[in-house]
Amino acid sequence: MARYNAMEEHFEEITVLDKPALFTGIRIERDTVPKGLYLYEVRGDDDGGSDPVQIARGIMVNHYGSIITREPIKLPQDGYLDIDPEKDWNFAGGDCRTVKEFQEKYQPAKKKEKERER
C-alpha cells in the first residue's frame, strides 16, 4: 500500500463534524503530517464506497481517503467513529489546497493571539 507525503500533495478543503479539514483520496504517511495537525483515514460505504461512513486512525478495507484536521477527533474506545455522510461531511469547503495553506488559514489560537498583540 503506497503512502504519500502530506507536504507534497494537493487536497480539497472540506468540513467534517463541523470542523475544517483537508481531504484526499490517497493514503498519507503519518510522519509527514506536521505537529499540531491530525491525520485520520476514512472508510467508504459497502455499496461501492461512494460515501464516507467511518473515521479512524487507519482503515484497511473500503479506504475512501485521508483527512487532516487542526483539532483531534474524539474516537470511541474501539477506534472507529461512524459518521453520516449527509450530516457530518461537507465537500463545500474553502480554498486551501495544501497543508501549508491550511496551517496559515487555521492557525492555533495561541498563535493568533500573539499576532493580534503586535
Image (cartoon, rainbow, N blue to C red):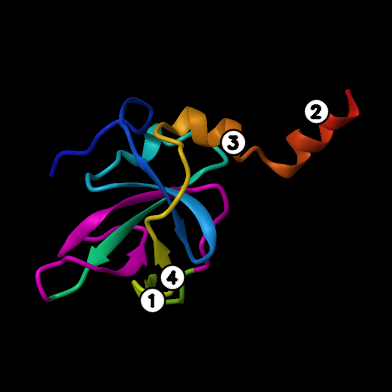
Mark 4 near mark 2, Cβ–Cβ under 8 Å? no
Identify whether 62 is placed above or below 101.
Answer: below
Q: Distance between the residues labelled 3 and 1?
A: 32 Å
Mark 1 near mark 4, Cβ–Cβ under 8 Å? no
Q: What stretch is highlighted in magenta?
A: 47-74
The percent position of residue 17, horizontal first and vertical second, equals: 49, 66
Q: In which quarter of the image is residue 58?
A: bottom left
Q: Distance between the residues labelled 4 and 2?
A: 32 Å
> Residue placed at 14% from the left, 75% from the top?
46
Label 4, on which residue? 88
Q: How far apart are marks 4 and 3 (CA)?
A: 22 Å
Q: How far apart are marks 3 and 2 (CA)?
A: 13 Å
The percent position of residue 74, horizontal first and vertical second, equals: 52, 67
**What label sits on residue 105 in the rendered view?**
3
* Nearest to the observer: residue 8 or residue 38: 8
Q: Which amino acid does label 1 sit on?
A: Asp
Say whether residue 63 is magenta: yes
Label 1, on which residue? 78
Task: Indicate the quadrant containing the C terminus: top left, top right, bottom left or bottom right.
Answer: top right
Q: Which amino acid does label 3 sit on?
A: Lys
> Residue placed at 25% from the left, 65% from the top?
43
Identify whether 50 is placed above or below 116.
Answer: below
> Residue placed at 25% from the left, 61% from the top?
59
Q: Residues within 10 Å of mark 4 (few under 14, many from 20)?
A: some
Q: Residues within 10 Å of mark 3 (few under 14, many from 20)?
A: few
- Helix, strand or loop under label 4: loop
**What label sits on residue 115 in the rendered view?**
2
- Helix, strand or loop under label 1: loop
Q: What residue type is labelled 2?
A: Glu
Q: How far apart are marks 1 and 4 (CA)?
A: 20 Å
